[in-house]
Amino acid sequence: MSGPEVLEVVDPGLLTTIQDGGRPGMAGEGITGGGAADRWSMAIANALAGNAVDAAALELTIAGPTLVALARVTVGLAGGIGGRVANTGVAVAPGTTFTLQPGDTLLLDGPATGARGYLAVPGGVDVPEVLGSRSTALGAKFGGLEGRPLARGDRLRAGAPADELTLPPRSWPGDPAPTPGPIRVLPGPHAAYLGTEALDALLATAWSVSTSSDRVGLRLEGPPIAGGPVAELASHGVVAGTVQLPPDRLPIVLLVDHQPTGGYPVIAVAITADVDRLGQLAPGSSVQFQATTPEAAREAMEMRRFLFRAGADELRENGRWDDLWLSAR
Amino acid sequence: MGPRIVPFGDAALLVELADTVSVANARRARVLAAAIERAREQEPGIDAPVAAAASVLVPFDPARTQADTAREVVEAALAVASTGGAEPHAASLHELAVAYGGDDGPDLELVAVELGLRPDEVIELHAATEYEVLFLGFAPGFAYLGEVHARLIVPRLATPRVRVPAGSVAISGPMTAVYPQASPGGWRILGRTDARMFDPGATPPARLRPGDRVRFVPRR
């Protein structure tokens, strides 16, 4: 059984994919976790649309898509990309819901305050689950819509029945995306091997995000980190937020589509609370790293959890809201 | 060296068992990962461990599990593994037909020159070994196989290819592998197999699983 068709793609934008909480725990099959590059923003979009935090949503990249409504439908927008309804001129801002009438054209071409935006529909985007998730695995081409980005003419279905596609207007009580700022890191498992000068250089430099960055990782440009030769190590498991130092001595920060294992030395690892922030860094933007402690990492994560719960509680007060908070991540 | 447990950010520990890639080290990693996997029933804040060449990454949910608790679980699992733990599942033997050389194996001739061998000797040495799946990584269904014959050890390409065709059979250092999908890659391509290595609709989706045995059969 499939839900009602709600949106048709007129222009797919730069890279629009279906993403959810991904496929954790499948590294033994060579499958990476994947899912939304910024879980925080996806959770807000889903909360606005009345969904569980990890329901499948559209992930927009830098230049979002143009969509035409096929039904009267309320959508939730969050993250770093805004837009407008072309035929009415009404601006739509991240952190709000808005109801489209059939035939309305939604143009998600900015303004952009970050690299990614999330658009949620009631009941989540309805595509088949593959290996436990609706996320698009772009490298191996499965999940989402046949494993590919959205294309012109695609019609998207919502998981909610036809009589539950609209919701009252509401807005997220806090920031609709992770707040910008330095990426807090802990020294990586190979920081000592690379030397304190290397870690100091990583922390002292304002790095520029290269245009060859994608959902696999951010390639950083700046002065190569000085030091002795960088050997390739026996491959080991890695996580999103891992900062690798390859032989060209320019750091790579792994994002959600990273390979399950890697062989470059790990100079630092971003704290869990800041991984979503990495997903909002667009090519050409600047990023700085800041050393922190395990205690501070824990406090930052608890603060994040508190903020989401408070926001979700405030939304729930206004209507029929189920328990939105499913997990801390 | 003895096992070294090091923090990997605020949500994982890395257990380094050795520095080098070998069948024996990968086996130790799998046995340890299996012991941690069993311990997860009591400690659900620990996420699925990732066994690799000579290490196990142990991710955990910092909202539910403290790093100290994860470390205790790892230490207990190391004790279990050292007294002879078990492989996660029974090994299968796979025979993969390979067309070596030509367009299917564009690096065969150069690798032979580099190693001071004839191309048919490279094929013979590559096909003579029954390999073990050390671990999966790089891409869905990509199995690292070891160890190749000592005379077949070559470095990867200095500049990786933008596109390696699906089914390419390649070598690098002590390992060999089949590329399951077309992807970028820096290993030296000796041949190609038609076998489908990854099918997201199948159970399990990856043809080769850690601990399995693999033979390459030259196709005439």
Image (cartoon, grey):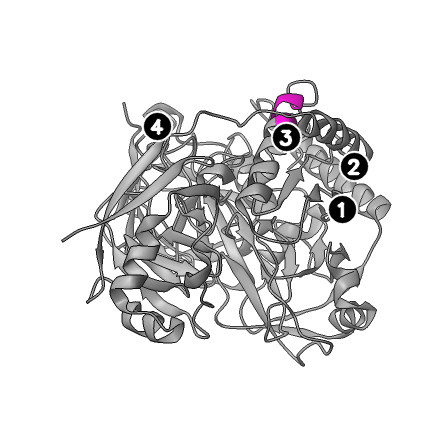
Tell me which segment is drawn in magenta.
B35-40
Q: Residue at x 52, y 30 (%)?
A: A50
The residue that disc 4 covers is B203
The amino acid type found where label 4 is placed reads: Thr
- CA distance separating discs 1 and 2: 8 Å
Residue A269 in picture, x, y percent from top left: 70, 54
> In front of the other: label 3 or label 4?
4
The residue that disc 2 covers is B67
Name the subunit of mark 2: B
In the foreground, A308 or A329: A329
Q: Is residue A35 left or right of residue B82?
A: left
Q: Residue at x 27, y 52 (%)?
A: B167
- CA distance separating discs 3 and 4: 28 Å
The mark that comes first in sequence, 4 or 2, is 2
Label 4: few (<14), some (14–19) or many (≥20) C-alpha neighbours in 10 Å: few
The amino acid type found where label 2 is placed reads: Ala
> In front of the other: label 2 or label 3?
2
- CA distance separating discs 4 and 2: 33 Å
| Residue B7 circle label | 1
The mark that comes first in sequence, 1 or 2, is 1
As helix, strand or loop, the secondary structure at mark 2 comes to helix
Furthest-top residue in view? B42
Location of residue A328 with respect to A193 vertically, above or below: above
The answer to whether the residues at label 1 and label 2 have Cβ atoms under 8 Å apart is yes
Residue B177 in picture, x, y percent from top left: 38, 52
The residue that disc 3 covers is A327
In the foreground, A279 or B147: B147
Residue B74 in picture, x, y percent from top left: 73, 32
